[in-house]
Amino acid sequence: MTIDLGRFTESQREAIEYGDGNLQLIAGAGAGKTEVLACRVAMLLDEKDPAFEPSNIVPGIGFSPDKMLQAIYWIVI
């Protein structure tokens, strides 16, 4: 799977490629948090990281789990 990281800002790319420990995304509305997190999850799934457990994804307040699942689906397929 290849994700086009060129469409993301430097900060977003850092979050997508982050590889050590927990990651917290804080940004305003419309900043691309859902897409960044979906790309990060897709990369972890693709890497088959044994430490990754989808149950550890904790969405923020008011976050739509359906929206996240749809975003991951469109990246993975």
Image (cartoon, rainbow, N blue to C red):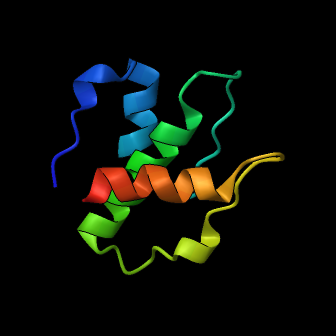
In the image, residue 28 above or below residue 16: above
| Left or right, 37 with reference to 72 | right
Image point 65% across, 44% down: which residue? 24
Image point 29% across, 75% down: which residue? 48
Residue 25 drawn at (x, y percent): 63, 38
Quarter in which the N terminus is drawn? bottom left
In the image, residue 39 above or below residue 49: above
| Left or right, 16 with reference to 28 | left
**Residue, far bottom:** 50
Residue 7 seen from this side? yes
**Residue, far left:** 2
Quarter in which the C terminus is drawn? bottom left
In the image, residue 58 above or below residue 10: below
Which residue is more in the foreground, 77 or 58? 77
Residue 6 drawn at (x, y percent): 23, 23
Residue 18 seen from this side? no
Quadrant of the rendered image containing residue 58: bottom right
| Left or right, 32 with reference to 24 | left
| Left or right, 8 with reference to 27 | left
Which residue is more in the foreground, 76 or 13? 76
Residue 70 drawn at (x, y percent): 48, 54
